[in-house]
Amino acid sequence: MIPEQLIQDFEGTLKNYSKDHAIFNEGAHADFYYQIKTGHVKMFNLTEDGKEFVQGFFENGNSFGEPPLFGAFKYPATALTLAVSEVYVLPKSKFLKLLKAHPDIHLKFTKMICKRMIYKAKIAREVSIYPPEHRILTLLHHLKANAKIEVDFEVPLTRQQISELTGLRVETVIRAIKKLEKSKALAIIDRKVVI
């Protein structure tokens, strides 16, 4: 999102995190901007019964956890590494200074946050009123639209990840995907979901 040299110019540092390391926890103060150089991070909440509800997965080049930096509120979710990860960390004050000096980057953040808000609104609606098949298709169509792929799109998520993103049990996701395949709403090719 932000060129690496620019992060370094504004006194950002590159930190190494081991797998399963919490970069920040839900409820913590938002004091830093985070951008992945290499690795994989998920942001999630725990339900009352201990089940994870995943807010998103982030990979190389992605940033995460920005809204609290703009809104001056605490992190609404926990960020956990899913693999050994190198992450740029930039203090909030330096991040805001960088955005003031580079309005083009600020505009990119505004657009990205808007896309994330639309996604969250779609998922909130899906979770509250629609059956599993509809929830899954909405998620998959959203991913395909963001990937800007017109033809067959191989979904880059496991059944477990689809479960975590839709609030469904893995068994329910497996049954729903089979049902969607029978209705020709999607295909299974080499064990991968294709839409």
Image: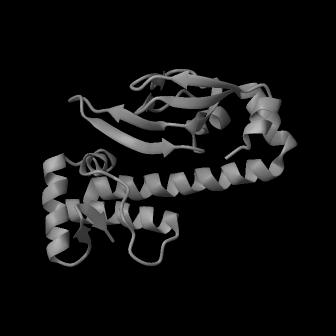
The colour scheme used here is one colour
* Residue drawn at (73%, 27%) of the image: 12
Is residue 143 in sight in this rendering? Answer: yes
101 and 82: which is toward the camera: 82
* Residue drawn at (82%, 33%) of the image: 97
Horizontal relation, residue 177 to residue 195: left or right = left
Q: Position of residue 164 (x, y in %)?
A: 30, 44
Total numbered badges shown on the rendered structure? 0
Which image quadrant is residue 129 in? Answer: bottom left
Is residue 24 in sight in this rendering? Answer: no
Q: Position of residue 85 (x, y in %)?
A: 51, 31
Horizontal relation, residue 46 to residue 150: left or right = left
Horizontal relation, residue 101 to residue 52: left or right = right
Which image quadrant is residue 190 in? Answer: bottom left
Whether 27 is drawn above or below 47: the answer is above
181 and 85: which is toward the camera: 85
Q: Position of residue 171 (x, y in %)?
A: 13, 50
Whether 170 is drawn above or below 28: the answer is below
Image quadrant where one finds the C terminus: bottom left
